[in-house]
Amino acid sequence: MSIVFVAREVNAAVVRGFLNSLAMDLVNRLVAEKIVSARAQAVVREGLPLTDYGLAVQRWVTPALVANTLTVYVNNALGQRRYAAFYGIANRSSTPGISAVQFQLGVAANTLDYIEIDQIYTEIQPSCYLQTPVLYKPGETVYIQVYPQFTPTEQLVLRNFVAEPSGQVSAPRLETRLIG
């Protein structure tokens, strides 16, 4: 189970360093796996709910939730030339009720991380960073479940980067200072 850091409690320079390091790690993985031959051929961008993870719309919103039951939020295979790293969670709902997020490798596979997020709800803008990002490799199935305390849908944002060869998806890339 990862440790989470409430966003307000983390220095902005530390966050930039953390995100820069994560982006560089993803680019280096693309090069090491020979998915791209040079770092300049890689793009690191924020992951998109519909495009990258198969949600119904291009915004982070859960399906109907069942109280006190793990509910599938994401179940989608990554492309063969794409990495994903989840590094933070935010809840934009007016009455948030999700108390945990479980990251798995496929439906019946290993749990990569189980993250309790109740502590972020003491904040006006509930969000956190994960001490250790959850990484998915090319071709792996991103399977994420949420544990709600009650039943409405929620705007639970799963902050993540996607790294891939340039030109795969027409989405804004991160500022160059983050990846090179």
Image: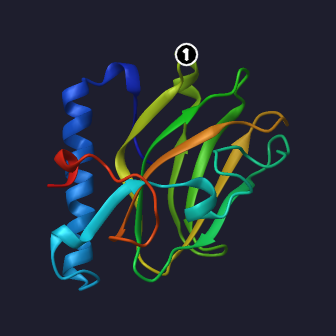
| Residue 63 against residue 67 in the figure, above or below | below
Tell me which residue sits at (52%, 74%) in the image. 78
Q: Secondary structure at mark 1?
A: helix
Badge 1: residue crowd in 10 Å (few <14, some 14–19, many ≥20): few
Q: Position of residue 50 (x, y in %)?
A: 64, 58
Indicate left or right for 97 with 173 as reference: right
Tell me which residue sits at (65%, 36%) in the image. 99
| Residue 39 against residue 113 in the figure, above or below | below
Q: Position of residue 8 (x, y in %)?
A: 38, 19
* Coloration of the structure image: rainbow
Residue 143: quarter of image? bottom right
Q: Position of residue 68 (x, y in %)?
A: 80, 42
Residue linked to disc 1: 122
> Which of 123/34 is in front?
34
Q: Position of residue 107 (x, y in %)?
A: 66, 73
> Which of 33/57 is in front?
57
Q: How many marks?
A: 1
Q: Amino acid at mark 1?
A: Thr
Indicate left or right for 26 with 6 as reference: left
Tell me which residue sits at (19%, 29%) in the image. 13
Tell me which residue sits at (14%, 55%) in the image. 180
Indicate left or right for 172 with 72 as reference: left
Residue 94: quarter of image? top right
